[in-house]
Image (cartoon, grey):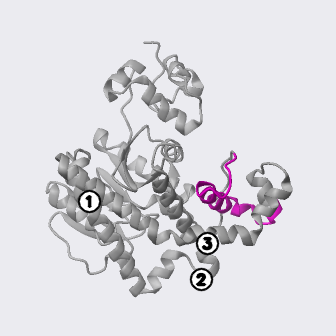
Amino acid sequence: MDANQDQGAKELFQGQAQLYKLMFSHLSSTSLKCAIELGIADIIHSHGRAITLSELVSALDIQPTKTTSLFRLMRLLVHSGCFNKTKVNGQEEGLSTLWETVHGIKFWEFMNQNPGINQRFNEAMASDTEIMTSFVVKAECKQIFEGLGTLVDVGGGNGSLSRIISEAFPGIKCTVLDLPHVVANLPEADNFKYIAGDMFQFIPPADAFLFKLVFHGLGDEDGLKILKKRREAIASNGERGKVIIIDIVINAEEEEHELTETKFLFDIVLSVNSTGKERTESEWAKLFFDAGFSHYKITPIFGMRSLIEISIQKKFKSICDYLAAIKKPVEDVDKQWQLAHGLGPDLRPLKAAMLGNPPYRQFGPFILQGSKS
């Protein structure tokens, strides 16, 4: 991609992010209205000092399972400047969504029962994919797909993303897995086909598994189940096996204020429609490492999305062999482990791994065998 194309892509994705912000901007005022009706400002004022999330939950007399929803509401309002930030610890996920409370069924069940709405939703997802895919597949991240023989696009809708991949890489046999009402009667090709099914029940084997905007609709428990199964599937596939995720990564410290706000607005939408959430890098890292993956790489794409590649690296005899293989300085590798486990900025985990210290023996992450070399 030359300089002019690069600038054009950047402007296109910035424009897309701005449109999303305009689409969901009503949620800022709605969230403020919610806080006013709950009397949150009065509770904080009466408290006389900074209030913790758990204290606010108790004062509001709401179910503890709604703690996460309250945190996400307050995170948006803090980012908007309505409140000041205090340190908050992670809490359990809610058991049901606002959508289920109102409609009595889950979001995807509602879509299945309303074909017209489902069609418009799938068309919107396809349009979103087409804007992004040509830059991702054909330019910025094409090396991720090179050398693959088979790929399954999990929850891939009408297959617009996989179709572009199959055209750009004719040697890859692409399969789109989605619910029966989504993939019914869609046209196939020699290296492109559909399978109707539920990703929680069955995902066909492949060299790589692609998830575009799937995990942000899943809570950590469901996401972990799927990732553990994918890890088992690629473990026997050598170094070629991988999971590719296109999703949102929150990086409030480094990205523009408006971009972070848009991601927080997306998060509010998810809190209504699903048990999912938008994740920070540390939350993504914990999910990957808990599932048993050893390595991840995040490539920011212009605008809202990032491309995440996760894999299982081979075992090495020493930390030196590992660092040489991945071609990364020790500080970068250690940062990934710190993000997943909440450690401070030092190299103790790596040094411990070199000596085979049991608490950190898995670090490489999860690939080093204890060694003093």
| Gap in angstroms between the C-alphas marked 2 and 3 | 20 Å
Question: Magenta stretch?
Answer: 59-86
Residue in view at x 51 percent, y 18 percent:
351
Q: Residue 176 in the image: x percent, y percent?
A: 30, 66
Instruction: Tell whether 271 sits left or right of 41.
Output: left
Mark 3–mark 1 Cα distance, whole angstroms, equals 33 Å
Q: Residue at position x 52%, y 75% from top?
A: 107
Would you say the residues marked 2 and 1 are in contact, meaning their CB atoms lie under 8 Å apart?
A: no
- Tell me the amino acid under the disc marked 3: Thr
The quarter of the image holding the C terminus is: top left
Which amino acid, by three-letter code, is at mark 1? Thr
The majority secondary structure of the magenta stretch comes to helix
- Check the image and report above or below for 163 versus 256: below
Q: Secondary structure at mark 2?
A: helix
- The question of residue 80 being in magenta is answered with yes
Which numbered dot is residue 30?
A: 3
- Secondary structure under badge 1? helix
Q: Quadrant of residue 151?
A: bottom left
Q: Nearer the viewer, residue 198 or 284?
A: 284
- Residue 21 image offset from top left, x and y in percent: 45, 65
